[in-house]
Amino acid sequence: MNENNFGRMRIDNQTESKIINALRFPLIAIVVFIHLQPMHSLRDMVLDNEGFNISYYIIEVLSHTIGQLAVPLFFIFSGYYMFKKEKEWLQSAVYLREMKKKAKTLLLPYILWNLSYLLLQIARVKLLNDTGTPTEGLDLSLPKLFQDLWLKPIDYPLWYIRDLIYLNLLAPLIYFLCKKFRFLPMLIVLGIFLAVPFPNLLVTGVLFFTIGSTFSINKVSLLDFAHKYRVALLIFGFLSTFGLPFFYGNYWTNNYLKLYQAIGVFSILAFASLFYQKAKAFPRGAKILKTCIDVLQPTAFFVYALHAVFIINWASVLGHKLTDIDLLAYFISGGGTIIFAVLSFYILKKLTPRFLAYYVGGRL
């Protein structure tokens, strides 16, 4: 970071990359906690007949309020770094070269994780049938396999990777529009996003990928922008994050959530840049934090792909068996899921690094 004559913080590319990379694992952890608690399940319990319930309030803030920002931020990062290096995206040779890279980092892991879960389902059905336990048959027809891969992924959190694959295929079009019309395409998609009266994951992906792409193509630093407007962004983020759980279920709240997503992602970036700036005043703590980031950040994709269908249900059952306190069970379940996934990553990295590399797209 550099301070110019006007007292405005300038964030260089190296610092920006450090801050964004440091955000990846905490955001994945939030995704884990999102999937621990279904939407709408606790919203009527924050304020119940007995008054304010602090446990359910904390769960709502983490899973369903801050949780609204995690995947949009990943879309922003993907669009931002897609176009960070200047390339001639309208040339077929450049496009094909970049798509070959994405086939290794996105397509191959996406197929491997979904097929792995499908094989586990087949093994489960066979085992149950062999033991005489009644079970539903498994539809392995081509239409069902197509649906399980490209419409509703079997490993359901990977809908983000599915949409990212589609958006990467459209890279030349996105590049052309953002280069020629600058911020106009982003504003048009934002208008559609805010106007759609129901949640739409595809529009969400298009919007936030376009935001990242627009900033990158037009040479505007994401973190520099967020840091410039940090006061307004932090006030908005604080009031919205901690106020929304009291109003869930109202018509205006559902619409406000979209505005919260569109602005709140920059609130997170503003907070991250401010935290990074202040952390330098505590060198020992900053060193410990850096060590934690170095250990955890490489595991982010593995935790994301593994947690939902392979671990989380078992961890949730274990959490509620260990304690009757909902909030404690919530953190035991989420924390246990994350710890198990992180340990599994490093065990596989030690034993079969090449095998693991295929599943994480080379993110070792």
Image (spheres, rainbow, N blue to C red):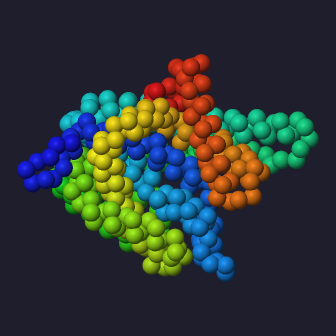
Quadrant of the rendered structure where residue 49 is? bottom right
Q: Residue furthest right?
A: 132
Residue 3 visible in the snapshot = yes
Closer to us: 7 or 151: 7
Q: Residue 260: horizontal and vertical position, in percent?
A: 39, 66
Residue that appears at 76% across and 35% down? 123
When the figure is inspected, residue 49 is found, relative to residue 257, above or below; the finding is below
Q: Residue 226: horizontal and vertical position, in percent?
A: 26, 55
Residue 141 visible in the snapshot = no
Total label count? 0
Quadrant of the rendered structure where residue 154 is? top right
Left or right, residue 315 beside residue 9: right
Quadrant of the rendered structure where residue 305 is? top right
Residue that appears at 34% across and 59% down? 267
Q: Residue furthest left?
A: 5
Left or right, residue 316 beside residue 206: right
Q: Residue 97: horizontal and vertical position, in percent?
A: 32, 29
Left or right, residue 238 beside residue 124: left
When the figure is inspected, residue 57 is found, relative to residue 281, above or below; the finding is below
Q: Residue 224: horizontal and vertical position, in percent?
A: 22, 50
Closer to us: 33 or 104: 33
Residue that appears at 40% across and 39% down? 285
When the figure is inspected, residue 59 is found, relative to residue 342, above or below; the finding is below
Q: Quadrant of the N terminus?
A: top left
Residue that appears at 60% across and 31% down? 343
